[in-house]
């Protein structure tokens, strides 16, 4: 079982990202489950979504409390939400930021995780370039695929295009691909740099 | 075809495959995605021969279903929580008249305090409304139960409620194997009503009945429900032959062989419970699970037989009878009357509180070690100190103010400030 917790703000697509990740894993012949936490949903409010991926059917329905990977769509959540609660010592971390992780006060956490398991991705900037809108979720899925190898970039892009036909899907797939390349070429290993 | 999709979308597709002729509904979270999807399917013509009525309330929704069903149309609605309560009077009319309406209930808590999240308070409040109640463990089962529900309803001329946990299932993306139209058509014949409002052959439906026959009419409502105890498993067996899946039926037995301790539950929590039971079995505990798929009618004899060899039963339920205790627990105690078994009632997951493996494992270990007092109703993960602090505030002065607001302030969920109200 590989479990992912995505933290974002209402409107950034955290729920959609978890759903797309589950579709990508399903398309690769695996079992997957995605679900959000719910509140009185409103733009800007903290939102959490979950995805579990496994080789056998998933019966568990509790929220993901011990994630193998955490995706942070909005670094301003750092001081508001316990983003890293339960994160596995062997876990992965994807943070949407164009700043070094040290500047976000994450140096200590980064030290605790294995080399190559942490990456900072300027997903909002990537999204602005490819979509013309600051929606980081597709780019972060590409980054997660590159960092963990849990799903392939192709499956992520297929899931995106399937959900969003036309140029919206193509643009988001481009954003995912750009973030994937960003992680693959620049960030692995000295991800913290 | 196997697809990865949202539970609500899966159920909407399954309902559409059943070719309803009238859908009357009013949106309410967490059921809304289901009726939105069905409304789209009617608008685009994908669901042909169906009239979608966006009514002004849930009371109207069920009233429209009653009229449509009496006029011979296969009728469907969906609701949640207060929406079901607003239907209450019409629910009893549907069952009393013997009209085979099918409903999806996306289970949600009932206020006050207002809460949009999942528990079973809505279904349990209407458990004695004369509707058959089937509870889905997964989205696959929710799909399968809807196909079976239409056949069951029309076979006995009785309304059927398919309960699926709001948000936990309705908003979960997971794998679902959707049947084809040909498969569903072969399984579910066109609706042939037992009674029909037909201008060419006029009858009255809904006569006033006095003391001379009221008990007898009601007796037949009960007898029909009891007949469903045979019909539910028969339809599930037919379904398995046609679709190759073991879905529905009265009960689900999981690792009950040689089990001394049995957990009884219904709905989506069964999956989490099965995971915990697997880990306890690995550690040598003789424990199993009895899932209740059909809660109304209550399968008294089948439950009694399934629990006959147990020494301890723990009922984990997402609702309770205020001032009395467990609801499913009361039924289980009735079914096990005279047997040497201790039945514990545990209320869990109210208002969307997650039911976790850790808490369940702790509970089951306590049950196995006989550390739970069966004379009390238990609440899983109850924040006792929060309750005690509020009780102290209430004792401190007569006009202490509203509990809910105080407790949120205590938890820091809402900003603290000087509460209103004087001495």
Image: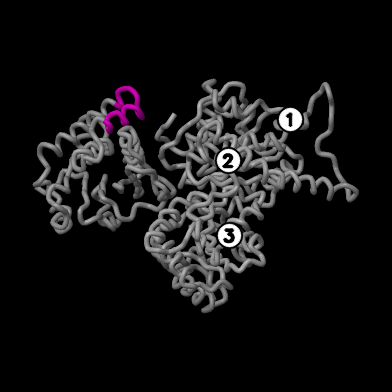
Question: In x, y percent, where is residue A122?
Answer: 18, 40
Q: Which residue is mark 2?
A: B104
Mark 3–mark 1 Cα distance, whole angstroms, equals: 38 Å
**Residue B320 found in image quarter:** bottom right
Question: In x, y percent, where is residue A75?
Answer: 23, 49
Q: Tell me which residue sits at (31%, 41%) in the image.
A: A12
Q: Tell me which residue sits at (42%, 32%) in the image.
A: B2
Q: Tell me which residue sits at (64%, 34%) in the image.
A: B151
Q: Nearer the viewer, mark 1 or mark 2?
A: 1
**What span is in magenta?**
A155-169
Q: Check if mark 1 and mark 2 are on a common chain.
A: yes
The colour style of the image is one colour
Q: Is residue A63 left or right of residue B222?
A: left
Q: Which mark is residue B307?
A: 3
Q: Is residue B301 above or below residue B417?
A: above
Instruction: Identify the element where label 2 is drawn.
Output: strand
- Residue A167 falls within the magenta-colored stretch: yes
Q: Nearer the viewer, mark 2 or mark 3?
A: 3
**Chain for numbered disc 1:** B
Q: Which mark is residue A170?
A: none
Q: Magenta: predominant secondary structure element?
A: helix
Instruction: Identify the element where label 3 is drawn.
Output: loop
Q: Which residue is mark 1?
A: B193
Instruction: Identify the element where label 1 is drawn.
Output: loop
N-terminal label among 2 and 3: 2
Q: Is residue B94 left or right of residue B318?
A: right
Q: Tell me which residue sits at (65%, 37%) in the image.
A: B152
- Residue B280 falls within the magenta-colored stretch: no
Q: Is residue B186 above or below residue B417?
A: above
Residue A7 seen from this side: no
N-terminal label among 1 and 2: 2
**Chain for numbered disc 2:** B
């Amino acid at each position: 079982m590989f479990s992912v917790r995505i933290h974002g703000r209402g409107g950034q697509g955290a729920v959609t990202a978890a759903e797309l990740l589950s579709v990508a894993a399903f398309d690769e012949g695996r079992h997957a489950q995605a679900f959000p936490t719910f509140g009185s949903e409103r733009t800007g409010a903290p939102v959490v979504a979950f995805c579990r991926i496994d080789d056998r059917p998933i019966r568990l329905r509790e929220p993901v409390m011990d994630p193998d990977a955490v995706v942070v769509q909005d670094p301003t959540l750092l001081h508001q939400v316990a983003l890293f609660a339960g994160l596995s010592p062997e876990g992965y971390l994807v943070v949407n930021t164009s700043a070094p992780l040290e500047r976000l006060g994450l140096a200590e956490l980064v030290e605790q995780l294995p080399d190559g398991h942490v990456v900072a991705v300027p997903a909002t900037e990537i999204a602005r370039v490819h979509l013309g809108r600051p929606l980081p979720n597709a780019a972060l899925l590409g980054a997660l695929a590159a960092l963990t190898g849990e799903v392939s970039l192709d499956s992520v892009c297929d899931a995106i295009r399937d959900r969003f036909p036309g140029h919206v899907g193509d643009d988001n797939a481009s954003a995912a691909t750009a973030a994937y390349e960003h992680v693959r070429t620049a960030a692995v290993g000295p991800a913290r740099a | 075809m196997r697809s990865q999709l949202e539970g609500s979308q899966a159920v909407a597709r399954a309902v559409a495959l059943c070719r309803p002729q009238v859908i009357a509904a009013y949106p309410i979270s967490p059921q809304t995605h289901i009726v939105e999807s069905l409304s789209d399917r009617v608008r685009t013509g994908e669901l042909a021969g169906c009239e979608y009525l966006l009514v002004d309330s849930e009371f109207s929704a069920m009233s429209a279903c009653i009229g449509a069903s009496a006029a011979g149309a296969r009728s469907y609605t969906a609701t949640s929580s207060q929406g079901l309560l607003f239907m209450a009077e019409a629910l009893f009319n549907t069952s009393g008249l013997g009209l085979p309406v099918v409903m999806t209930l996306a289970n949600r808590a009932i206020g006050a305090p207002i809460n949009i999240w999942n528990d079973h308070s809505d279904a349990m409040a209407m458990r004695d409304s004369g509707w058959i109640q089937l509870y889905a463990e997964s989205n696959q089962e929710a799909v399968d139960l809807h196909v079976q529900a239409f056949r069951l309803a029309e076979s006995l001329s009785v309304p059927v409620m398919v309960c699926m946990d709001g948000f936990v299932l309705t908003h979960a993306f997971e794998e679902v194997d959707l049947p084809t139209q040909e498969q569903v058509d072969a399984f579910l014949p066109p609706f042939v009503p037992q009674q029909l409002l037909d201008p060419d052959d006029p009858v009255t439906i809904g006569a006033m009945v006095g003391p001379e026959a009221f008990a007898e009419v009601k007796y037949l409502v009960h007898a029909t429900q009891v007949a469903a105890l045979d019909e539910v498993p028969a339809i599930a067996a037919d379904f398995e032959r046609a679709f190759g899946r073991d879905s529905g039926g009265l009960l689900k037995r999981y690792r009950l062989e040689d089990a001394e301790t049995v957990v009884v539950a219904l709905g989506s929590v069964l999956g989490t419970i099965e995971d915990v039971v697997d880990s306890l079995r690995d550690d040598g505990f003789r424990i199993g699970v009895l899932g209740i798929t059909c809660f109304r009618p209550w399968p008294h004899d089948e439950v009694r037989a399934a629990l006959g060899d147990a020494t301890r039963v723990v009922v984990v339920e997402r609702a309770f009878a205020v001032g009395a205790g467990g609801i499913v627990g009361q039924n289980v105690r009735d079914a096990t009357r005279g047997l040497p078994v201790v039945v514990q009632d545990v209320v869990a997951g109210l208002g969307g509180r997650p039911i976790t493996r850790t808490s369940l494992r702790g509970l089951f270990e306590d049950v196995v070690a006989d550390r739970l007092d069966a004379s009390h109703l238990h609440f899983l993960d109850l924040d006792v100190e929060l309750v005690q602090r509020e009780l102290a505030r209430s004792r401190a002065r007569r006009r202490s103010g509203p509990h809910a607001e105080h407790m949120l302030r205590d938890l820091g969920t809402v900003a603290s400030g000087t509460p209103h109200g004087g001495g």
